[in-house]
Image: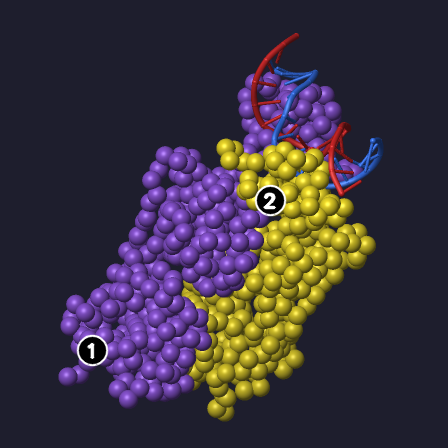
Chain colours: A yellow, B purple, C blue, D red
Amino acid sequence: MDSKPNIQDVARLADVSIATVSRVINNQDGVRKATEERILKAIEELGYIRNAAARTMKRKETNTIGVIVPDIKNPFFPLVMAGIEQKAREKNYFTILSSTNESPVIEEKIVKNFIERGVDGVIITTADENGEHLKLLQEQNIPTVAVDRSIKSFEVDTVLVDNVKGAYQAVQHLILQGHRKIAIICGPQNTTPGFERFLGYKKAIEDYNIPLDERLVVQGDFGEHSGYLATRQLRELDERPTAIFSSNNLMTIGCMKALDDLNWKLGYEVSFIGFDDVDIATFLNPKLSVVARPMKAVGEIAFMFLHERINFKEALPKRQYSLPPELIIRHSCRLMKK
Amino acid sequence: MDSKPNIQDVARLADVSIATVSRVINNQDGVRKATEERILKAIEELGYIRNAAARTMKRKETNTIGVIVPDIKNPFFPLVMAGIEQKAREKNYFTILSSTNESPVIEEKIVKNFIERGVDGVIITTADENGEHLKLLQEQNIPTVAVDRSIKSFEVDTVLVDNVKGAYQAVQHLILQGHRKIAIICGPQNTTPGFERFLGYKKAIEDYNIPLDERLVVQGDFGEHSGYLATRQLRELDERPTAIFSSNNLMTIGCMKALDDLNWKLGYEVSFIGFDDVDIATFLNPKLSVVARPMKAVGEIAFMFLHERINFKEALPKRQYSLPPELIIRHSCRLMKK
DNA sequence: TTGAAAGCGCTAACAA
DNA sequence: TTGTTAGCGCTTTCAA
């Protein structure tokens, strides 16, 4: 067991040719039982493990998919990942995950590295939807699925949650409670989720004949701190909103911290609803109403798409799947007293 | 651009030998400027990307480390991962992550797959500390670092947080507030964190001459639901505890849900302190006191250990690093009224 | 400064 | 049922 044993060593020990050993380690038939056992024994004895690099060189496939997320610390992604991994495991695929820290530069490096490694496909939530830095995927003809954020510069299969509908429902709920001064903490408008959720907000107030008040529209960056700042800004207004809609989980957390610091009474002085369910939702008093997304299902469908794309490459037209969000009513939206 | 271009295609187009191309793509010198530019141009034109499999075959190293965690959905791990990734990126290593779902069987498969791929090392929080299923790592002489949970069956570098100390401080804090009926929600006793935190608990009450009351020791499995159940069980006691110490983050969450359901007033009727800081800690009322762990530092040190081990293999003795936890006092532990 | 060529460990086509 | 052999795409040694 000096340096790593290879297929040669096994063949020699079992007194057969390497071709026969190859058959055994690949579970092909056409090997006499006794021979197989001898080989298995040799493998065991030497502690032989097949070299994936060499195998890949011949086979041109790795049975591995790469997953790229912008921020592993955002709980949304581990949940999506769990869905991907489960389905992948069923189909005998391996999954490798990398996080870009929201940096397109790092993202590009990761993509390149994944391609070098010959992943059979990639699932990505990009740090920059314009997607120029992802052209490699297209050029190299790598099956790709976009999740949560779409890619502008070329066509890919995409799995999204219906952001417009989710935001609409949330805001509608507020309106039906009698609110008219409804603020929105927006995500970045150059991202699909940020833009579409704002769209849903606008659509809802429009449908109910509420004029859009620019002062109630505050920009955030999907980060916790921006939610905090936005909330403080809203509090400064002469005419304060009676309700707030936050566009994502992290900003919701920031918003709650601000509410607490400002002593702005959740549910009483200001109603609240957020996009994305969060851990803290049921621990607050009152409990937070939210629009929840089916993260695991997102991951599962993303993998199914990718798997089909890997196996039929050109044949399929590009698809987009939009999952319905779910409105979860708890107690943070109160009826407006007239 | 029919099938993927290789080094041959580049060489042909640039009218040089493949050796020269190889020099360029590996940034070696000894290539005339003009030649280099011609090659670069050819690479660009063809969209050439070097094949990692072929490269690995020659080089015998991948500049990649594998990370194995038991549950990607537990926020502890993404945070550790962030620390690993950051340091790895600095040293030009790539990181691939897989989650085992707490299954030693899946874990063994992942380990094997990582070895097949020739990872230069692995960082692992194992699903089964006895570690028989990890012998491969040892046999194949793969540099390995254990994180958070140790491995019994062979020696590895290990990075832990000082569980005994953390639990001791937490329980001591309770004692100094005048509590004597202090319950513990334990983790599995066959895991290092579960066992050691119980040890810290015992040590603390012993030091302060409080007899161990078996009824106040409830077993959990580190999962949320077990924390919930444990809390209900404690509530049933004739002599209820005046304080609870929970051994990890998920059980803390379960415990909080139970407190709420049982209408058992946190801080007033029962004091609480938990191992691990949690998102919800500062949103509860009163805010939760906890023992926090430096997750990112854990990841960083784990990578540093691994990196040294990769570069000096045999030379180093096995090391164990124990990080100090931090006691964060908020408001969930109240002074006992005499 | 450049090129020729050996060979890394494996799979698969073909032959026996 | 088993063996021989030609590469897969690259790095690296040696020679020019």
Q: Chain of mark 1?
A: B
Residue in front for this viewpoint, A198 or B235 = B235
What residue do we see at 25% from left, 78% from top? B213
Helix, strand or loop under label 2: helix
From this viewpoint, which residue is outermost toward the front? Answer: A34
Q: Is residue A306 visible?
A: yes
Q: Tell me the quarter of the picture where residue B18 sits.
A: top right
Choose mark 2 or mark 1, whichever is in front.
2
Q: Tell me the quarter of the picture where residue B10 sits.
A: top right
Real-space Cα separation, disc 2 to disc 1, in angstroms:
61 Å
Q: Estimate the x, y position of residue B185 in percent, counting from the top left.
A: 34, 73
Q: Estimate the x, y position of residue B234 in percent, counting from the top left.
A: 33, 82
Q: Is residue A132 visible?
A: no
Q: Chain of mark 2?
A: A
What residue do we see at 47% from left, 78% from top? A288
What residue do we see at 27% from left, 61% from top? B164
Residue B180's tag is 1
- Amino acid on which disc 1 is placed: Arg
Residue in front for this viewpoint, B134 or A182 = B134
Residue holding disc 2 = A41
Helix, strand or loop under label 1: loop
| Location of residue B337 with respect to B193 vertically, above or below | below
What residue do we see at 35% from left, 43% from top? B318
- The 10 Å Cα crowd at callout 1, few under 14, some 14 to 19, many 20 or more, is some
| Location of residue A85 with respect to B223 vertically, above or below | above
Q: Are marks 2 and 1 in contact (CB under 8 Å)?
A: no
Q: Estimate the x, y position of residue A268 in percent, counting from the top left.
A: 42, 85
Residue in front for this viewpoint, A11 or A169 = A11
- Amino acid on which disc 2 is placed: Lys
